[in-house]
Image (cartoon, rainbow, N blue to C red):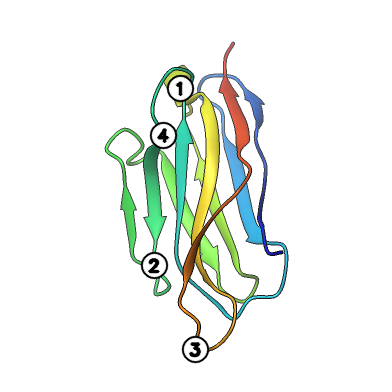
C-alpha cells in the first residue's frame, strides 16, 4: 500500500525556519501535481502551495515571499521551505499528490498523515 510520508515538522520560534519533506513510501510510476495543505485548530484545511510536474508553482497570499515549494523528480520528493515563520503558521501540514501507480492507470489523490508545525516563543 503506497503512502505519502512526511517529515520535518516541529517547534520553532517566530522568525525561524523549517523544511518539510514528503515522498511516497512504495513504488510508483509517476507523480503529477504535488501540494501542501495545512489545518489549524478549529479551522478548515487550506491550500498552501502547489507545484506541477514541470515546476509551475502557486502560493496562498498568506505565505507568498516566505514559503518555497520545490520537488526532486528523481527522488519523487516534494519540499516546503518555510522562512520567517509566524505564530499564525501553526498548523498540521499535509502533503498531497496525484500518484499514478502503474502505466495506463489514472492518477489518484493521496494524502500524508500530517506533520505538526508550531511557531511559538
Give the residue at mark 1. 86
Q: Residues within 10 Å of mark 4 (few under 14, many from 20)?
A: some
Give the residue at mark 2. 52
Please tell me which of labels 2 and 1 falls first in the chain: 2
Please tell me which of labels 1 and 4 falls first in the chain: 4
Q: Label 3 to label 2, Cα distance in Å?
A: 20 Å
Q: Secondary structure at mark 1?
A: loop
Image x and y of residue 80, in percent: 52, 48
Identify the residue at image location x=43%, y=20%.
88
The correct choice, above or below, for 58 with respect to 48 in the image is: below
**Horizontal relation, residue 98 to residue 16: left or right:** left
Q: Residues within 10 Å of mark 3 (few under 14, many from 20)?
A: few
Give the residue at mark 4. 45
Please tell me which of labels 3 and 2 falls first in the chain: 2
Identify the residue at image location x=51%, y=27%.
91
Please tell me which of labels 1 and 3 falls first in the chain: 1
Q: Label 2 to label 1, Cα distance in Å?
A: 27 Å
Identify the residue at image location x=51%, y=23%.
90
Does the residue at mark 2 contact the one at mark 4 (Cβ under 8 Å)? no
Q: Residues within 10 Å of mark 2 (few under 14, many from 20)?
A: some
The correct choice, above or below, for 1 with respect to 103 in the image is: above
The correct choice, above or below, for 24 with respect to 9 in the image is: below
Front-most of residues 106 and 95 = 106
Q: Label 1 to label 3, Cα distance in Å?
A: 43 Å
Image x and y of residue 95, in percent: 54, 49
Does the residue at mark 2 contact the one at mark 1 (Cβ under 8 Å)? no
Q: Label 2 to label 4, Cα distance in Å?
A: 20 Å
Q: Label 1 to label 4, Cα distance in Å?
A: 18 Å
Q: Secondary structure at mark 4?
A: loop
Q: Quadrant of the N terminus?
A: bottom right
Q: Secondary structure at mark 3?
A: loop
Give the residue at mark 3. 104
Amino acid at each position: 500500500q503506497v503512502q505519502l510520508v512526511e517529515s520535518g515538522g516541529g517547534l520553532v520560534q517566530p522568525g525561524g525556519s523549517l523544511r518539510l519533506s514528503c515522498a511516497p513510501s512504495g513504488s510508483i510510476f509517476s507523480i503529477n501535481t504535488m501540494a501542501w495543505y495545512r489545518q489549524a485548530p478549529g479551522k478548515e484545511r487550506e491550500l498552501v502551495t502547489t507545484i506541477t510536474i514541470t515546476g509551475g508553482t502557486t502560493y496562498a497570499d498568506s505565505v507568498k515571499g516566505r514559503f518555497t515549494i520545490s520537488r526532486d523528480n528523481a527522488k519523487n520528493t516534494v519540499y516546503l521551505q518555510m522562512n520567517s515563520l509566524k505564530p499564525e503558521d501553526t498548523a498540521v501540514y499535509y502533503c498531497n499528490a496525484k500518484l499514478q501507480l502503474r502505466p495506463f492507470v489514472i492518477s489518484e489523490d493521496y494524502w500524508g498523515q500530517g506533520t505538526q508545525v508550531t511557531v511559538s516563543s
